[in-house]
Amino acid sequence: MITTLAGGGGAAKFLRGLVRVASPGDITVIVNTGDDSEFYDLYVCPDLDIITYTLAGVVDEQKGWGFRDETFHFLETIRNYGEEAWFSLGDRDLATHVHRTRLLQQGLSLTEVADRIRRAWGVQSRIIPMSDAPVRTRFQTPAGELAFQEYFVKRQAGDAVEGVIFQGSEQAAPALGVRQAILEAERIIICPSNPIISIGTIL
């Protein structure tokens, strides 16, 4: 069995190649969830989704995220109502977030939800969040402390970073299956991902 530690885009591209040279069913992907956030009361997991969409063969390869041939009518409409819409959520992508949020509200863990979503897309490799507990990457900047998506997407990484905080990491435990995947692995691969805010968050 091969166990990988993964962030988002770079890891997804690497895994797309890995499943071509190794049996997809023998691969477990432990994914960073420090980038997770809530938009419009929906629970959004960017790294889990890009890994799932990529292994399912439906990702938009030009953008490196979201669905291929996506539309954005929701964002256009909500902007018309005067709402902020700086985080791009495609119409098909929204279905994933609605589905995930509803399952979490029903009491399922993020691990269980991630497994249901990858199975729905026919992904053979196991995809596990690093933790079921919320861990949030935050940046200390001259403008104050910023959430991950606010720093990277809304402010386009324009602020100087004075420090990085993994909020909630001290209380969080590895998700169910993470320890087993590491202990039973014949190989452990650290995917090409940001060493601080992707791999560092997992560690």
Image: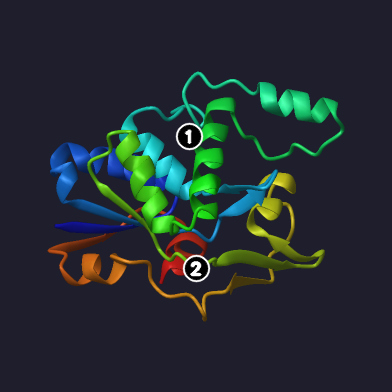
Residue 72 position, x and y percent, is 64, 23
Out of 80 and 166, give the one closest to the viewer: 80
Question: In percent of the image, x 17 and y 46: which residue is there?
Answer: 25
Q: Amino acid at mark 1?
A: Gly
Q: Quadrant of the C terminus?
A: bottom left
Residue 104 tag number: none
Q: Which of these two is toward me, 13 or 57?
A: 57
Q: Secondary structure at mark 1?
A: loop
Amino acid type shown at disc 2 = Ala
| Residue 152 percent coordinates (x, y) | 65, 50
Q: Marks 2 and 1: in contact by CB < 8 Å? A: no
Q: In which quarter of the view is residue 178 placed?
A: bottom left
Q: Secondary structure at mark 2?
A: loop
User: Residue 156 or 171: which is nearer the viewer?
Assistant: 171
Q: Please give the name of the residue rendered at 22% of the width and 43% of the height, measured from the top-left corner.
A: 18
Alpha-carbon span between mark 1 and mark 2: 27 Å
Residue on which disc 1 sits: 64
- Disc 2 packing (10 Å; few <14; some 14–19; many ≥20): some
Dot 1 or dot 2, earlier in sequence: 1
x%, y% of residue 28?
25, 54
Q: Is residue 16 visible?
A: yes
Q: Nearer the viewer, mark 1 or mark 2?
A: 2
Left or right: 5 as drawn, with respect to 157: left
What is the quadrant of the N terminus in the image?
bottom left
Circle 1 residues within 10 Å: few <14, some 14–19, many ≥20: some
Residue appearing at x 28%, y 57% in the figure: 4
Where does label 2 land, which residue?
A: 133
Q: In the rendered view, does 6 fall on the left or right side of 96?
A: left
Residue 134: x percent and y percent?
54, 66
